[in-house]
Image: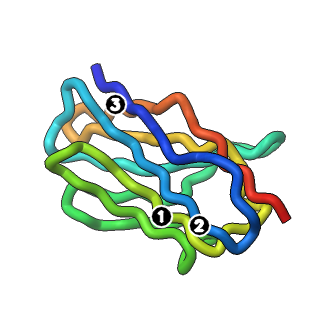
């Protein structure tokens, strides 16, 4: 079993920055992908950014050039630096981990990010 604990959400004005963190614990296979998804009210959950244990990254189109994903493999922690935030970035942000060996996916409890105009 894998547990994911997110932190760093909150309220920020448009144009501001926030940094999210997600620490994973439990039975973690060394090869995995960690990432962030978000879900706004009335909308489907969407990919924000993901990063493999080898460092390959993938970003959603709406955040390219503004958000940066990184990870510390020794700490099993993934970070999301969010810059130039817009009101449309307002959502619950969920941490995700997919194990390479089993394909199993795990989710955090979510953290609220609110961007005021």
Rendered residue at 19%/61% (across/down): 54
Q: Quadrant of residue 25?
A: top left
Reading the image, the residue beneath label 1 is: 81
Residue at mark 2 to residue at mark 3: CA–CA distance: 32 Å
- Residue at the bottom extreme, as displayed: 65
Reading the image, the residue beneath label 2 is: 17
Percent of width and height locating residue 41: 80, 41
Query: How many numbered badges does the structure rendering display?
Result: 3
Q: Quadrant of residue 76?
A: top left
| Quadrant where the N terminus is found in the figure | top left
First along the sequence among labels 2 and 1 = 2
Rendered residue at 42%/50% (across/down): 35
Rendered residue at 17%/36% (across/down): 29
**CB of mark 2 within 8 Å of CB of mark 1?**
yes
On screen, 71 above or below 66? above
Percent of width and height locating residue 108: 47, 32
Reading the image, the residue beneath label 3 is: 104
Rendered residue at 41%/63% (across/down): 69
Residue at mark 2 to residue at mark 1: CA–CA distance: 7 Å
Percent of width and height locating residue 107: 46, 32
Percent of width and height locating residue 92: 65, 42
């Amino acid at each position: 079993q894998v547990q994911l604990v997110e932190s760093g959400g909150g309220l920020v004005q448009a144009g501001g920055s926030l940094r999210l963190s997600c620490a994973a614990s439990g039975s973690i296979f060394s090869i995995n992908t960690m990432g962030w998804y978000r879900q706004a009210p009335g909308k489907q959950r969407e990919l924000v950014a993901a990063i493999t244990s080898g460092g390959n990254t993938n970003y959603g189109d709406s955040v390219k050039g503004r958000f940066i994903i990184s990870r510390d493999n020794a700490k099993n922690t993934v970070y999301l630096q969010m810059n130039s935030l817009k009101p449309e970035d307002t959502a619950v942000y969920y941490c995700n981990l997919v194990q390479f060996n089993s394909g199993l996916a795990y989710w955090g409890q979510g953290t609220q990010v609110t961007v005021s105009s």
